[in-house]
Image (spheres, rainbow, N blue to C red):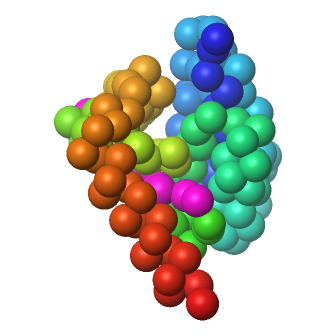
Amino acid sequence: MAKKIAVACDHAALDMKAEVLKYLSDNGFEYYDFGTYTKDSCNYPDYAEKVCTAVYNKEYDLGILICGTGIGMSMAANKCKGIRAALCSDTFSAKFTRLHNDANVLCMGARTLGCGLALEIVDVFVNTGFEGGRHQTRVDMITALENKLAK
Ligand code: RB5
């Protein structure tokens, strides 16, 4: 079954998000665009929350968040329960964060990456699976850390 992808951006990344949505559509992925929908200034944590909530609730398999640098989105996303967000600017990281970290949200910077590279990163991220095994132990440790520090 095709993976379902939740996507959002802030005002800095509207054009790149459009390219990402086109890639997902052209490649048979189900997706939902959680906004923003205009270039009016907005606050990236609002959009990180929408996508991360949808991923946490298992309504979507993976999330993609784009802002100017990708940093704000990744900081906000990694505050959300159950989210392992990876800020990627190369395909090697995109591949290994799925294989080893079971990253469930990809963050990218629209002001730091060209669209061609961004789409290659998306392609690798959405088409690579988690390896499990010894990496599951480490991912479980991240979850334990999240629960410990939340107390
Ligand atoms: C918006 O100007 C910018 O701060 C935002 O897109 C992002 O880069 C934050 O991390």
- How far across and how far down the image is residue 24, in percent? 60, 20
In percent of width and height, residue 111 lies at 41, 53
In front here: 24 or 18? Answer: 24
Q: Is residue 43 left or right of residue 95?
A: right
Q: Quadrant of residue 23?
A: top right
Q: Is residue 77 magenta?
A: no
Tell me what residue is drawn at x 38 percent, y 25 percent. Answer: 128
Picture residue at 50% right of the left edge, 83% below the top: 148
Name the residue located 65 percent from the left edge and 60 percent from the top edge.
48
The vertical placement of 41 against 127, above or below, is below
Where, quadrant-wise, is the N terminus in this rendering? Answer: top right
- Residue 29, compared with residue 118, is above or below; it is above
Q: Is residue 13 visible?
A: no
Q: Nearer the viewer, residue 28 or 10?
A: 28
Q: Residue at x 35, y 47 (%)?
A: 136
Q: Which residues are magenta?
A: 82-91
